[in-house]
Amino acid sequence: MSSADGRNARGLFKLPLFTMELSVQEGDRYILVVAEGMENKRIGDAETGIDAYLLDTQNPRAGRKDLTLGRFDEISDAAISRNGDVVFSNMINQAHPDGIYLITSQEVHTPIPKVEKLFDGPAGYVDWAPNGDDIAFSNRDGIFLLNIFTRQVSLIVAGDNFRPVFSPDGKHLAFFTREFSQNQLKRTYGISIVDLHAPADVKQLKIKKGSFPQYITWSADGRYIAYALYDSQDRLSCFAVRVNGGKQHIPIFRAFEGGLRTFEWTRKKYFPTNVLTTTWAELRASGLTGVGYE
C-alpha cells in the first residue's frame, strides 16, 4: 500500500508468487491476483503454473487462497466484483484463447470452487462493471460487453484495442488502442474512452511516444487515468493523465526503483489521521485534487 509518490509504501502480503494482474474489490476487503508460482523449496509452498489467488486484507495472516488450483492452462486476467464474484479468462498452451469463467461469491471460499463457463471464445483482459451484471473483455476483434445473466455479447468498439477498464460510475470504458504503420513495422499506442450510452462517441488521449503500454486504471474519483508503460529504452514508468483533457502526463510512483507493472487505487484509510498519509501527494502538487485516494 502506497501513496502515488511511492515514498510511504508498506507491505500487505509477501507471497512466493510473481503477480501478473491485480484487481481490488470495491470496499477493499479482497484483492484478487493472477500470479505464477515461484520456486521456494525452503518454505515448501511453491506453486507451479498461472492461477488466480484471493487475498483477504482483513486477515493477511491467512495467506493466499488458490481459486483455480492448476485446473486451467494459463489464466490471462481476472477481476473481482463488488459482490465478491470472480471472473477470469483462460489461455490454452499460450496460444489458443479458451474463454471466460465465473466463480460466484458463494463458491469462492469452498475448498475447490465450482467454476462456470460464461463465454466460449477468444478473450484476453476482463473487467467487472460496477453493477456486477456485465463484464468487459477484449480480443483481436475489439472491445465487448458480456451480460452474466443473459450471456449476451455486444461489440462496443471494433479494432485493435485491448485492456478495457470501467470508470467508477460504470458509464465509460477506457482502453488502449494500437495502430500499425503501412509497412507494419512501427506501432503507436494511445488511450481511448468510450461512452457506453453512445458507443460512437470515442475520446482519444495520447500517451508517451515510443513506448509499450503495460497497465491502465481509473483513479477512484474518475477524474484521471493512470497507466504504466515501457519506454523506448525498455524502462518501466507510471503516469496519470486527466480524463477531461490536458497534455501533461504526471509521473507517479517515482520512488519505486524499476517502476510498477501493476497497481490499483483504493479509498481505504490505513492510518488514524484526519488527513490521510496515503494520498495522491505528488499528483496534488501537480494540480490534481484526488485527496483521500491511495
Image: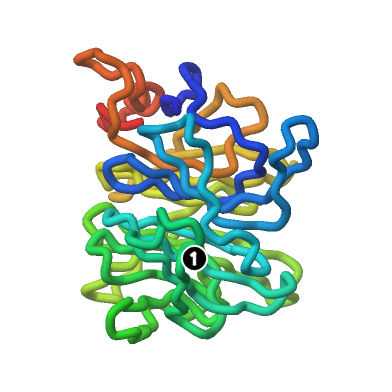
When asked about the image quadrant of residue 277, the answer is: top left
- Label 1 element class: strand
User: In the image shown, does 51 or 180 lie closer to the viewer?
Assistant: 51
User: In the image shown, does 224 or 294 lie closer to the viewer?
Assistant: 294
Q: Position of residue 267 (x, y in %)?
A: 28, 34
| Residue 247 in sight from this viewpoint | no
Left/right placement of residue 7 relative to residue 267 reads right
User: In the image shown, does 140 or 34 lie closer to the viewer?
Assistant: 34
Q: Amino acid at mark 1?
A: Phe
* Quadrant location, the C terminus: top left
In this rendering, is residue 105 above or below 124?
A: above
User: Crowding at label 1, few (<14), some or many (≥20) Cα neighbours within 10 Å?
Assistant: many
In this rendering, is residue 281 above or below 43?
A: above
Which residue is depicted at the point 38% across and 39% down?
265
- Residue bearing the label numbered 1: 88
Which residue is depicted at the point 36% across and 70% down?
135
When asked about the image quadrant of residue 254, the answer is: top right
Q: Position of residue 172 (x, y in %)?
A: 29, 63
Which residue is depicted at the point 45% across and 69% down?
114
Which residue is depicted at the point 51% across and 57% down?
67
| Residue 156 in sight from this viewpoint | yes
